[in-house]
Image (cartoon, rainbow, N blue to C red):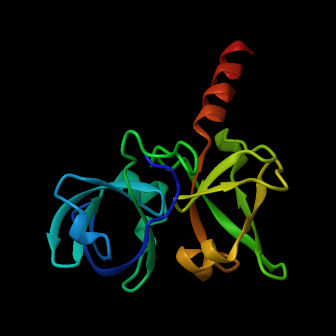
Amino acid sequence: MFTGIIEDLGTVTHLKQDLDNLHISIKSDITPELKIDQSVSHNGVCLTVIDIKNDVYTVTAIKETLDKTNIGALKINDPVNLERALKLGDRLDGHIVQGHVDQTATCFNVEEKNGSWLYTFNYDASLGNITIEKGSITINGVSLTVVNSKRDAFSVAIIPYTYLHTNFNSFKTGTLVNLEFDVIGKYVTRLQGFNS
């Protein structure tokens, strides 16, 4: 369980294909605080630490993860949004994030707004996920508030701190991102489908 508040922007240092799996090594300031078997969110994807060497740690993504997220598109030196799992008793500054990506979306537009940025994303609405105005959405692991909600698109406003401390500053038109829709909204949508 995560909150969508990014702790560090890691850097991909090594990628190794192993059958259908991909081992990803990441350099990060939080590495010294990690341990083997710990869960860490990577662009919103919960992955398990399997190795630690100095300031670099390694996780493994299986085929299911590679097929459904942007993790398989990572390249050496790419920035990765990182968050360690929530500790019970901590403040929930973002919203409840599971680290289970529902689908990807494509950045459609980036607009600078005199001190902030407005990002618009398109996604495949046929998969049954929805956004609502002022509802929560997780993009690459970042907890955000939806604006301009449409059937297959939405926007989010990014403040300078988030722009500087996440990989939002590398997004441009065509960038593929991970989406995790609000968990409460997913259950309500599913229940309504059963009652139809």
Which x, y percent locates residue 111?
Answer: 81, 78
State the quadrant of the C terminus: top right
Tell me what residue is drawn at x 62 percent, y 41 percent: 182
Q: State the image quarter where residue 90 is shown.
A: top left
- From the image, which quarter does the N terminus lie in? top left
On screen, residue 32 versus residue 196, left or right, reads: left
The one of 146 and 19 positioned closer to us in this rendering: 146
| Picture quadrant of residue 165 | bottom right
Image vertical order of residue 100 relative to residue 141, above or below: above
The number of numbered discs placed on residues in the rendered structure image is 0
**Residue 23 to residue 125: above or below:** below
Residue 17 visible in image = no
Q: Which residue is drawn at 54% across and 62% down?
A: 140
x%, y% of residue 147?
81, 55
Q: Residue furthest bottom?
A: 77
Farthest residue, direction top: 195
Give how far across and how far down residue 30 sits, in percent: 31, 70
Q: Does the image show residue 153?
A: yes
For image coordinates 78% across by 57% down, the residue present is 154
Residue beneath the point at 85% across and 55% down: 148
Whole-percent x, y for residue 155 in the image: 77, 61
Relative horizontal placement of residue 118, taking residue 175 as reference (left or right): right
Left or right of residue 169: residue 155: right
